[in-house]
Amino acid sequence: MPKNRYHHGELRAALLDAAEALVRERGADGWSLREASLQVGVSPSAAYHHFSSREALVHALSGRVLAQLGERLSRAVQEASSEGRQQCLIAYARGYVRWALDDPAVARLAFGAGDPEIPLPTHPHDVLAAELDRLVDAGGLSAAARPGSEFLLWSAIHGLANLLVEGLVHLDDHQAIDLQTERLVRTVLNGLAHEHPAAPAWPQARSAHTERLARQSVRPERPGTAVNDRGDRE
């Protein structure tokens, strides 16, 4: 693999690019921070100024990949918005499955590394949750069925994507994959529409991302800390 060129001040991004290329070539575990450094053309000691370990580089790459996925899914939802809220969720699911199939090694790394510890500009979970909220507002999903519904849909969508990537389920072509994905989403939403309240209540599913959001929502303000119109702390 030829060495990547980078401009001064862009070493961090260049290392992430090199790591992503190595993941595609060898998989999530078949490379080292030293190899990523050599691909960029710098010494490992230079790389350590940006990443303390290979694990730190993997976590940073996972965060970048998930942020890119979030942007991709957000665009897919926006493009389908004129077709109705349920169609937006189908577009989300199709985008997710296509992404996993188009870039399986990077997808494995993104989810195998765990949720990034820093907030993402656009998290895939937030795109899905917002779209389900809009579906409730449009009357396509009852408010009673809304809590936890993003985890049901995510489980179904991610499960299909993973089965296809691992070759455990086979479909003839992209059109068949899209149709199967649509059927999956409609089936989950139909089940939610006919759901009866559980006694005791359904379990509350959580993820690292939602737990972080919950902590942030209850974090007390420091005395003398103001928040400006952009949401920045001053």
Image (cartoon, rainbow, N blue to C red):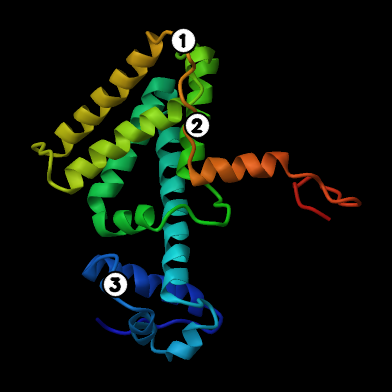
Q: Is residue 133 left or right of residue 107?
A: right
- Is 12 or 28 nearer to us in this picture? 28
Specify whether residue 86 is in view.
yes
The image shows residue 194 at horizontal and vertical percentages of 37, 8
Horizontal arrangement in the rendering, residue 160 relative to residue 203 (left or right): left
Task: Name the residue beneath numbered marker 2.
Answer: 129
Residue where numbered disc 1 is placed: 197
Amino acid at dot 3: Leu
Residue 114 x %, y % = 43, 54
User: Quadrant location of residue 156?
Assistant: top left
**Element marked by disc 2:** helix
Residue at horizontal 46%, vertical 25%? Answer: 203
Task: Estimate how packed mark 3 is, as few (under 14), some (14 to 19) or many (20 or more) residues with alpha carbons within 10 Å.
Answer: many
How many marks the image carries: the answer is 3
Amino acid tagged 1: Pro
Per the model, the C-alpha gap separating discs 1 and 2 is 20 Å
Number of other residues with Cα within 10 Å of mark 2, as a class: few under 14, some 14 to 19, many 20 or more:
some
Residue closest to the eye, 56 or 183: 56
Residue contact between numbered discs 3 and 2, judged by CB atoms under 8 Å? no
Q: CA distance from mark 3 to mark 2?
A: 33 Å
Q: Nearer the viewer, mark 1 or mark 2?
A: 1
Q: Which mark is residue 22?
A: 3
Q: Position of residue 32 (x, y in %)?
A: 34, 78
Mark 1 neighbour density, 10 Å: few (under 14) some (14–19) many (20 or more)? few
* Quadrant occupied by the N terminus: bottom left
Secondary element under disc 1, as helix, strand or loop, is loop
* The C terminus sits in image quarter: bottom right
